[in-house]
Amino acid sequence: MSVVNCLFDCKPIAKAKSLNEDIKADDVLQIQIILAMSTKLHRNPPFRAEHLGSLLRPENLLQTRADVDKGAAQQEQLKDIEDNAVKGIVDLQIKLGFHAISDGEYRRHMFWGTFFPGMEGFQEVQNPDPNIFRMYIPDIAAFTEAGHKPGETVICTGKIKHAGSTYVDQWNYLKNLLPKDRVHECKLTLAAPNWYHLRYKEGLAYPKSVYSNDTEYFADIAKAYQTELQILYEHGLRNVQIDDPNLAYFCSEKMITGWREDKSNTKSAEDLLSEYINLYNDCIKKCPKDMHVGVHLCRGNFVGSRHFSEGGYDRIATNLFQNLNVNTYYLEYDTPRAGGFEPLKYLPKHKNVILGVITSKFPQMENLEEMKNKVLQAADFIAEGNGETQDEALQRLGVSPQCGFASHASGNSVVRDDMIAKLKLVRELADSIWPGQP
């Protein structure tokens, strides 16, 4: 048992060999972060009413980007339209009463942006060999079953090194649209550190001549994230949301079955999930304590409001909630495919959950009282797991849509008025449970 993991183990710390043996500097730093988190709940951010970052793009933005891709418009024209669109969506979020303001991800084609292809050691492949993919990974399976090639394929081809932030310009423009006293509230969404690993068959995410194993590969990914987060922090960012459908894939019985049947895998899915959680912890371990870090789990949100996987959090709850050192979990809960609230019993007292009880996929409006009852049910399970009251558990909750409105630039099966109505409902729901709180 590691020095760090013993802090999360359900058994008494006394059963660990010794907290004095082989303590490394990184262990000490991580312990300090964990202890700081355990004594203080990070609030504002997150807020009672949240959304997940991506918002529907204006039509003129989509058309101009398409024209640039075809060579029919200049990049400078696109930037002007992006700037104006971001100003407009920031104003709308403020008007609707949101505090974790995003830029709508208006400068991105997909929700993860260009972090990976922007690093040394990664290369985008236009026509990848299908044999490199684990075909049972939910998004890969969905694309190939429909007769399409898998989405954007970026593969490690050399030693990974941070080569300049592809996020910082987006952030700097956003922060300058807000008063200085609100900049710390603004939210930037980031790609998941495991994004270009799970989809590839074991040993094919990187050349063996560059990295001999996952441990070496993950170490350099973590260093790149540490650098990125430090740059963003120095530019004023205090609210980070990492978007990670991959973690939710571990809830899928279909994926787990495929994993077990794949004879090329030398480790279990459970072991890989633990490695991903350790990777996350390495990525964020140097974040200052005033930087809020959250992770968003959903089951896919693609063109036409398509989802990729199903399965409740039960399979991963203990590991996810107790071992991943984030402040907040943004969880999909808009349909039965995400399971029940029972796994929230494993949420520690120093962590928040934002319940994605309102769907961003379709225009039909949810019933306010039904949504309120769902939040209270979730609070009851959290209270049961921590020996506290419902009111105490509610202090660690907020509400949101289950995912963004445009994880892909084309957006979900909703129009702008639908999106606004959903966001208003999120704000109304939050106000009905936590009146007067942001």
Image (tube, helix red, strand yellow):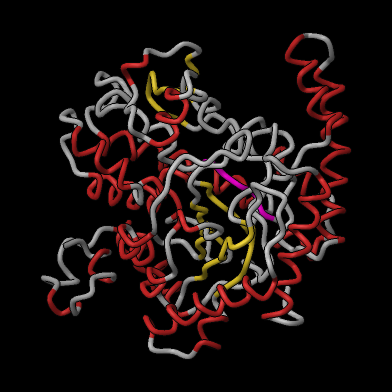
Q: Is residue 418 left or right of residue 313?
A: right
Q: Residue at x 52, y 76 (%)?
A: 41
Q: Is residue 123 visible?
A: no
Where 373 sits versus 167, above or below? Answer: below
Q: Is residue 68 left or right of residue 335?
A: right
The overriding secondary structure of the stretch rendered in magenta is strand
Label tally = 0
Q: Is residue 216 magenta?
A: no
Please identify the quadrant where the N terminus is shown.
bottom left
Q: Residue at x 50, y 12 (%)?
A: 126
> Image quarter for residue 221?
top left
Please identify the quadrant where the C terminus is shown.
bottom right
How far from the left and from the top, in percent, is residue 427? 75, 68
Q: Is residue 228 left or right of residue 66?
A: left
Q: Nearer the viewer, residue 266 or 56?
A: 56
Q: Residue at x 85, y 39 (%)?
A: 85
How far from the left and from the top, in percent, is residue 302? 58, 36
Where 261 sits versus 353, above or below? Answer: above
Q: Residue at x 30, y 47 (%)?
A: 253
How far from the left and from the top, in percent, is residue 325? 41, 62
| Magenta stretch, residue numbers | 187-191
> Image quarter for residue 164?
top right
Q: Is residue 319 left or right of residue 87?
A: left
> Image quarter for residue 30?
bottom left
How far from the left and from the top, in percent, is residue 169? 71, 37
Q: Is residue 100 visible?
A: yes
